Image (cartoon, rainbow, N blue to C red):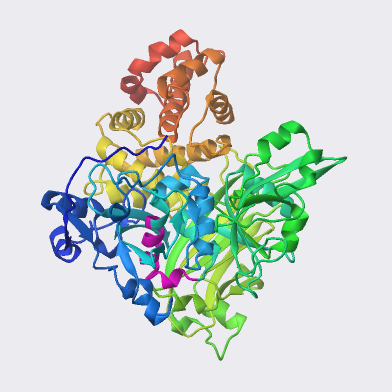
Amino acid sequence: MAVCVSPPSQERGTMLNLSSALRLEQGMQTAGATGSLQNLRKFNDQDFEHLRSLCLSQGLLFEDDTFPADISSIGLNLLPKDELQQIEWRRPRELLRNPCLIMDGVSRFDIIQGEIGDCWMLAALGSLTMQKRFLENVLPKDQGFQSDYAGIFHFRFWQFGDWVDVVIDDRLPFLNGNYLSVHPRTSNEFWPSLLEKAYAKLQGSYQNLHGGYISDALVDFTGGVQLQFSLKDPPPDLEDILKAASKSQCLMGCSTSSRMRNRVLRNGIVQGHAYTVTGAVKIRFKNYWEHIIRVWNPWGHGEWKGPWSDGSPEWDQVEPEIKEELYRRKNDGEFWMSCESFREQFSWLCICNSTPTFLDFGDQHYTAWSVDRHISLWNPLLTAGRNNWSSAGAVSKNPQYFFKVTNYDPKSYNVVISLIQKNAEGAQDAQKLKIGFFITMENSKVLKQYFSLTRDVSSYFNLSPGTYAVIPATTEDREFEFVLRIFVKNQDYNENSNSQLNPMLPMDVPRQKQDSSYKAIFLKYAEQGSAIDALQLQQLLNDMILQDEMTSLGGEFSFDSCRAILALMDLNSNGQLTLQEFGSLWRSVIKYMDLFRREDRNRSGFLDVSELKNAIQTAGLPINEQILRLMAMRYGDVYRRMGFADFVSCMLRLETMSYAFQNLAKGGPHLSMTVMEVRMLLPSLELHSRTVELS
């Protein structure tokens, strides 16, 4: 059943251009905006809520003068001049009586590519629809064609370290009565067309979507890190990487050779085309195991005709239960093929996730990735220059960013470097810059180098323990801003470890050294640099921790929970945390984030009772089944699951109770807490924990 309902009868509102006047009325963004999901950067300084409210109050339909309904938004070179002049712009309500933004949920099968050659973006979009945790960031729920309709919509994309909110009107381009852009399989579902328009606005025009890299779109939709794998010279562990990527719910896409664009081969594969990888499994076939890959064509039709395709005899030789689960014979653009055929027919595989979980395969357990992020400029004076290039010159003159490797396994990868060049919004020519980086040891000897003409230059490595430096560089004598991210695997967790490598911090916050980072964070929120109260603590924790997609799924820190946390850490009994007290709290939060990520193996954003038990035991705290159930009931939801904020509250409480109980034992024999003792400690702990020695 469709989620939309019939709209109330109303006359079509007068159209008026509002955005220019509103820019003066709404003012500039709040100072200190970070471009996080909680504090979005407004593209073109357009505020969706304010614009919509003003339109509704005046009975107007929004028209966007920053992306107008004319040739400038299409692009001068996308179509012949005579066809450009025939473009018509229509709102969904001019086409249908009852348009909907979403019908029966969001699916890759809602998408059918139009005349624009943006298969690279649509293949990434198809993958996005399969991962709700990312999709909800891009497609806000506070809009539609029924309630509060004013012809205005908005979508969010990650751009060079910031989440950006892009506002559009709902006028869509048509040529000879047909969609110029992507069109939905269901005639009255418009989320694909409107999202594509917002992405075109971000890129400068629809023309700038005509050809591109699926890797760029995957990063723009997630804020994650992507890696590309050549299928003509694949890594020996390609099948393991694919299975790990599928298991950890990564976004995946692939592409064919670009020498013959949009040429359909006899076997059904389109050359010069991008596809979505929607699954990878290993099944029993005859007397051996077969690795098969599921792929989707953004055209919405046109499928592989070889082994494991729809109707192929291979499906008759697998177990009925497997066939029932995997096999669908539909002309919807999706098909299965063997891993061998996949390598033969496609040129590149691209995988993207918040962290490089697709490199966690084999016998590895409890892996986590830390990330350092740096935003800076290439200064022409610091580059060797196009005509005077040398690695030695680049290493000696360019800024260096250090990282430390402590965990090493010769069979796995432990470092990923991602370098993104930041070009002016809507300017595609900057992607032609040849950029890259060097990796050196402390003695400045260049160990590895990696360069490319793409916007995003990323690669993975297996480095032995030691201290390294990354040196971004470009062969062009031009100044450009860049985003450098350094991902390092931290595998062997030990809560008492003094390792300088911190656990995973949010994607949108640079990782700091434990000894110094909490001071900068504290001073940012403390009044006059002295102390922070519960309200400031709430804002701090939500800003610094919940910017990360994984930990934000379970909800924010409430004011009451922050008051309880403050009471546990407030040794001075004054209702505030000093810098020293906050430092102790911050180290605990970082430790708990690492624990949470390690135990949340299905990346749901929650811990069930079993995962909670493992986390508590890993932290070295006493626990039994009765106390476990009590904590799950106290801090969990109706399903006894805990999000990250509740997990932090639970662990701080349990840790403090453990210390308090040991203190009450006064050095006697080891005792275990009973449920009754826990119940007695719970309501009074905030008041009495201040008197308990926590050292």
> Taking 1 as reference, is 476 left or right?
right
Using the rendered view, name the quadrant where residue 199 is placed. Answer: bottom left
Q: Magenta includes 173? A: no
Work out whether residue 289 or residue 441 is closer to the camera in this orientation and state it: 289
Which residue is depicted at the point 52% across and 87% down?
A: 385
**Prevailing SS of the magenta stretch:** helix
Residue located farthest toward the right when viewing the structure as drawn: 287
Q: Residue furthest front?
A: 176
Q: Is residue 264 left or right of residue 542?
A: right
Residue 425, located in which quarter of the rendered image? bottom left
- Residue 445 x/y as whole percent: 65, 73
Q: Position of residue 103 (x, y in %)?
A: 41, 42
Q: Position of residue 422 (x, y in %)?
A: 43, 70
Image position, residue 399 (x, y; %):
49, 72
Residue occupying the far bottom of the picture: 387
Residue 273 placement, left or right of 562: right
Query: In terms of image quadrants, where is residue 446?
Result: bottom right
Vertical position of residue 622 compared to residue 359: above or below:
above
Q: Which residues are magenta?
A: 194-210
**Residue 410 seen in the figure:** no
Residue 579 visible: yes
| Left or right of residue 158, residue 438 in this image | right
Give whichever of 177, 264 is nearer the camera. Answer: 177
